[in-house]
Every structure is written in C-alpha cells, then in structure tokens.
Amino acid sequence: MFILDCMTTQIVFSDEFNKHDTADHPENADRLYVMLDALEQTSFYNTLQFIKPEMISEKLLYEVHSAEMIEKIKEISKQGDSWIDLDTYVSKSDYETARLAAGGVLQVCRAVINGDAQNAYALVRPPGHHASQERSMGFCLFNNAGIAAHELAKKRKKILIFDHDVHHGNGTQSIFYSRKDVMYMSFHLSPHYPGTGDACEIGQDAGKGYTINAPLGFGHDERGLSQLFDEIFLPITQQFKPDLIIVSAGYDSHHADPLGGLKLSANFFGEMIRRLQDIQPRIVCTLEGGYNLQWLGKCFISQLGQLVSHPERFEDTIKGNDDVSSIIKTLKKELKECWEL
Ligand SMILES: [Zn+2]
C-alpha cells in the first residue's frame, strides 16, 4: 500500500478557479479548459489522483501578504469585475477563489512532503508569482507558491522554487529575498515585464546566494537553457539539497507564446522536470503563465508525463540563440562566494 501511494501523482483542481474570468484577457478560464481537455486524452489519465482544494487560512495569508493588500482584494471581490492595475482584474468572489488556489498548492505540497504522493500538479488560477508581500499585480492576486513554501519552511523544510515562466517572478523573489530556507531560481526574458531579475539580484543578508536569476535576451533556445542547467541550476540545487521543489510552471516561455520571446519547445518543459527529478523527485508544479491555447495543453502534458513516468513527445523543434556564455560567466562571478560552480 505504501509503495502504491508513493507512486501517486496528485492533481489539485476545482471548477471554482474559472470564476476568475473576464472577456478578452489572455489569463482567462479557457486556459484551464484546454489543459483539462489535453489531460483527458492521455493514456495515464486514470492513474491520476484528483483532489479538491481547500481555502488557505486567513492567518497564513496575513503571514505572507500585507493587511492592506488583503483587505483591498477582499473588498473589491464583493462586487467583482474590477481592475487593480492596468492588467490585473478581480472577479466577483475572487477573495475566496484566490485563497482556494493558494490552499490547493499547499495541500499537494504537504502530500508530497509527507509521502502521500510522489509528486503533484496544481491546476490553479489565478496565478501567483508576481504577487509580492504588498502588491497584487501581473495577473496575480496572492502568491500561491510563496505561501506554500513559507508554511513548509516553518516546519524546517528547505524549498526550492524553480520558475520557468518567461516573466521574472518578482513577487516570489521579494518575499524570500532575505531568507535562506526558500531558494528562488529563475530564467526569464530580459528586458521584459516586470523589469526585475538581473543576475546581480542574488538575495541579501542571510538570503545572499539564495536567489538565482538568469536573464536571457530575445530568442534564446533550449540548447542554451540546457547549458544553464548543467553549469548553474543543477550544481546549486545539488548543493542546496531542497526537501521539495515547487515549479512555477509558466508556459509563456514556449516559442509560440504571444506574451513571450524565448524559444523553448513543448518537449523542454518535460525535460526540465527530468533534470530536476534526478536531484529531488519530490516536485509540485503550479500553473503560472502560458497563453497560446494551441500549445498550452502540449507543454503541460510534456511536463505532467514526466511526473507520472510516462514521457510524451510532440512534433516541435525550434532553434534560436544558443549562446549563454556571457550570462554563465556573470552568474559564476556573482555567486562564487556562495556556491561551488
Ligand atoms: Zn508569465
């Protein structure tokens, strides 16, 4: 029984997430419908364990986000259909919906840490990685991965948040910038929204060396990324020894994404999981961006297939810029006092 449980991949999902929706916005309910459609067509669908999310407690929410920010979302969500900045909307009941998303991520993280599941995928919306302690922004209301990591860190667990969204996760970075119990590691397009994530941003005080940023220019492909894994991401992960890896799974780094500019193939999303699994198989992916509805399902299945040990490959090859020598050189210099690279 123990062995069977251990091999389980959990999926946390609720129809409630699609209450967060507004016409003509790229981050809309169709995203989850496309992903669910793709999921139903897989040969491993029946092996997955679906679980329903529970709302994150207000107590925990207040530990990560400011009272002012929380009260603002709570108030706006009573009426709904309002915008808190130029690109971030709040639907009716979003205070509950966003807490459900954060709660779902924490539930599956706990299951994986406790050995009740081998790994998990949180099919949740709204996304979270741009939400800082004080501000909801960039389509994100509360920081789903950050809240889960914060809670697990209280139990003396070391957490790596690996962010492959095309945008830098400024919110997640800022929450943990002075901490060494939660490492934030990201590659992203630069210059691009939200403007943060320079290689010299490596954390401060006790957190120095526990924030890793690889900003990449337009058109970088997975050959360069692969080299970054070999020379920077994997050696640091090996030395950090996380108890759990939370992947901020943004598929807008795919070459066909309308909001992107990197050139990753759908298959590379699975490949990144394979590489991380070699070091720590306890992995929870949580949905962030990804706005090309023709490719979103494939990117997701590439990743999930790797989690369930049933790798899927898609016809999708693309070449771009593979030269990452200068960013690797810079990172080795920035991080030389912190890690053996
Ligand atoms: Zn994004």
Image (spheres, helix red, strand yellow):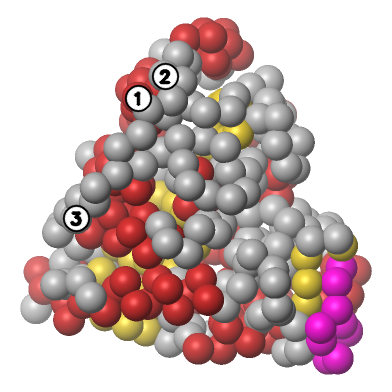
Rendering coords of residue 181 (x, y %): 54, 44
Question: Is label 1 in contact with label 3 (beta carbons under 8 Å)?
Answer: no
State which region is magenta. Answer: 75-84
* Tag shown at residue 341: none
Other residues around mark 3 within 10 Å, as few (<14) / some (14–19) / many (≥20): some
* Tag shown at residue 312: 3
Q: CA distance from mark 3 to mark 2?
A: 24 Å
**Residue that mark 2 sits on:** 322
**Mark found first going from the N terminus, 2 or 1:** 1
> Which residue is depicted at the point 20% across and 71% down?
42
**Residue that mark 1 sits on:** 223
Rendering coords of residue 197 (x, y %): 67, 32
**Mark found first going from the N terminus, 1 or 3:** 1
Q: Which element carries disc 3, helix, strand or loop?
A: loop
Question: Is label 2 in contact with label 1 (beta carbons under 8 Å)?
Answer: yes
Q: Which element carries disc 2, helix, strand or loop?
A: loop
Quadrant (top left/top right/bottom left/bottom right) for the C terminus:
top left
> Which residue is depicted at the point 75% across and 83% down?
91
> Which residue is depicted at the point 37% across and 64% down?
297
In the picture, measured across the screen, residue 157 lies left or right of residue 308, that is right
Q: Is residue 197 above or below residue 45?
A: above
Other residues around mark 1 within 10 Å, as few (<14) / some (14–19) / many (≥20): some
Q: Which element carries disc 1, helix, strand or loop?
A: helix
The amino acid marked with disc number 3 is Glu
> Which residue is depicted at the point 9% across and 78% down?
1
Ligand 1 within 8 Å, label 3 CB: no
Q: Is residue 180 visible?
A: no
Q: Quadrant of residue 33?
A: bottom left
Ligand 1 within 8 Å, label 2 CB: no
